[in-house]
Image (cartoon, rainbow, N blue to C red):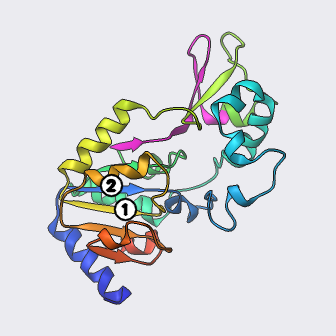
Amino acid sequence: MDNFQALQTLRRWVSQSDNIVFFGGAGVSTESGIPDFRSVDGLYNMKYKFPPETILSHDFFCNHVGDFYEFYKDKMLYLDAKPNKAHLALAELERQGKLKAVVTQNIDGLHQAAGSKVVYELHGSVHRNYCVKCGEEHDAEYMKNSPFIPQCRKCGSLIKPDVVLYQEGLDQRTVTGAINAIQQCDMLIVGGTSLSVYPASGLINYYHGDKLVLINKTATNYDERADLLICDSIGTALDCCV
């Protein structure tokens, strides 16, 4: 099946379905100018004082908080980024009653900015930040504009972003919600992810329907399991469905 036929099939399946779940990764946000992690130009292939995998760990946050925030504010906070065609298409499909949930590995909040209401953020969000002492919440703008290490406006203590760092577990309520949505959907669209990050990528195993769609520019380990495989931009593919 060529790409044109695949997109036509995707459009037909979407028109016939009323319980769709979208599972997305970093490739959804790269079209908004936010770099991913594992591509040739991704964060993991850039040179820093410490490897990004080390910086984005719980131990590093606790023991090198200054270096953590130098990297975090420079490379993780893209507050000027806007939703792209993929985000907008998904929000529209939700408004139409077709899409029941977005499950995302991204932490940028662009799905909500586009208008999506039911979003399971597996790895948290840069838009939620909490004081480790009193629990006071701070927004991403406060974090971005704080000099050096952000401190709580209420008690002056350290603030931690509500993002899942290496060595930390996923929020179980979020995972449970995502699993339930995937188990119940009649169509699962997976896009912009290599499906190599566990445990998040394992959620695809909870889908037992016959409309598993994989949209990605490069191959994944799950390609052979897909009922429909599309090698194209996420925005291009989803935009044709609304």
Give the number of the mark in front: 1 or 2: 2
Residue at horizontal 68 percent and vertical 9 percent from the top: 155
Q: Identify which amino acid the numbered label 2 is placed on.
A: Ile
Left or right of 13? Residue 49 is right
Let me know if residue 129 is in the magenta part: yes
Q: In the rendered image, which quarter is residue 122 located in?
A: top left
Let me know if residue 50 is in the magenta part: no
- The mark that comes first in sequence, 1 or 2, is 1
Mark seen at residue 169: none
Q: In the rendered image, which quarter is residue 47 located in?
A: bottom right
Q: Is residue 242 visible?
A: no
**Distance between the Cα atoms at labels 1 and 2?**
8 Å
Looking at the rendered image, the quarter that the N terminus falls into is: bottom left
Q: Identify which amino acid the numbered label 1 is placed on.
A: Val
The residue identified by callout 1 is: 190
Mark seen at residue 204: 2
For mark 2, give the secondary structure.
helix
Left or right of 202? Residue 55 is right
Residue 74 lies, in percent from the top left, at 75, 46
Residues shaded magenta: 118-141
